[in-house]
Image (tube, helix red, strand yellow):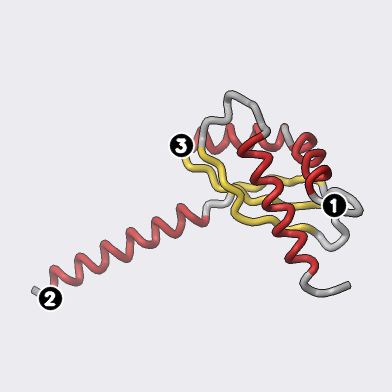
């Protein structure tokens, strides 16, 4: 097997899942902005860990994650229609907090820069 096939499969599944979440899930409770940040498909195509970032309150994040986990079968079926794979992986949804962590670190660095700038005067 070619070594870059896994990366291609990850990207194709990521595009398909993102498209399905944005356009095909009709749950009215899904109000927060959701983006798929990464997908890791196992080599045997048995599982796909889908990392999502949710822009909203903590409660919206939990509710969105629950909605997506309940819709995993539907999403898997739709991915099977969009991506030609031998077997369609089971979807495991995980919350990705890396964007919030990055914003927090950026705010801390900005605060440090401000305090060091004030001290030098």
> Looking at the image, how many numbered discs can be counted on the residues?
3
Quadrant where the C terminus is found in the figure: bottom left
Q: Quadrant of residue 41?
A: bottom right
State the image coordinates of residue 103 (x, y, percent, origin top left).
40, 56
Q: Earlier in the sequence, mark 3 or mark 2?
A: 3
Q: Is residue 104 above or below residue 16?
A: below
Q: What kind of element bears circle 1? A: loop
- Residue underneath mark 2: 120
Q: Does residue 57 appear left or right of residue 4 in this picture?
A: left
In the image, what residue occupies the spot 73% across and 52% down? Answer: 13
| Neighbours of disc 1 within 10 Å: few (<14), some (14-19), many (20+) | few
**Which residue is denoted by mark 3 in the rendering?**
57
**Distance of label 1 from label 3 (alpha carbons):** 36 Å
Q: Nearer the viewer, residue 14 or 58?
A: 14
Q: Which residue is mark 1?
A: 84
Seen in the picture, residue 12 relative to 34 is either above or below; the reply is: below
Residue 26 location (% of width, % of height): 65, 27
Instruction: Determine the image quadrant of residue 104.
Output: bottom left
Q: Residue at x 66, y 43 (%)?
A: 19
Q: Residue furthest right?
A: 86
Q: Which comes sooner in the sequence, label 2 or label 1?
A: 1
């Amino acid at each position: 097997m070619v070594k870059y096939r896994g990366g291609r499969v990850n990207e194709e599944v990521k595009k398909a899942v993102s498209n399905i979440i944005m356009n095909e899930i009709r749950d009215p409770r899904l109000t927060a902005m959701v983006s798929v940040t990464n997908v890791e498909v196992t080599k045997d195509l048995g599982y796909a860990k889908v990392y999502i970032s949710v822009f909203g309150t903590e409660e919206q994040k939990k509710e969105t994650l629950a909605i997506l986990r309940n819709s995993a079968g539907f999403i898997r079926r739709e991915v099977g229609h969009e991506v030609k794979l031998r077997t369609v992986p089971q979807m495991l949804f995980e919350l990705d907090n890396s964007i919030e962590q990055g914003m927090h670190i950026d705010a801390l660095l900005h605060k440090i820069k401000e305090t060091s700038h004030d001290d030098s005067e």
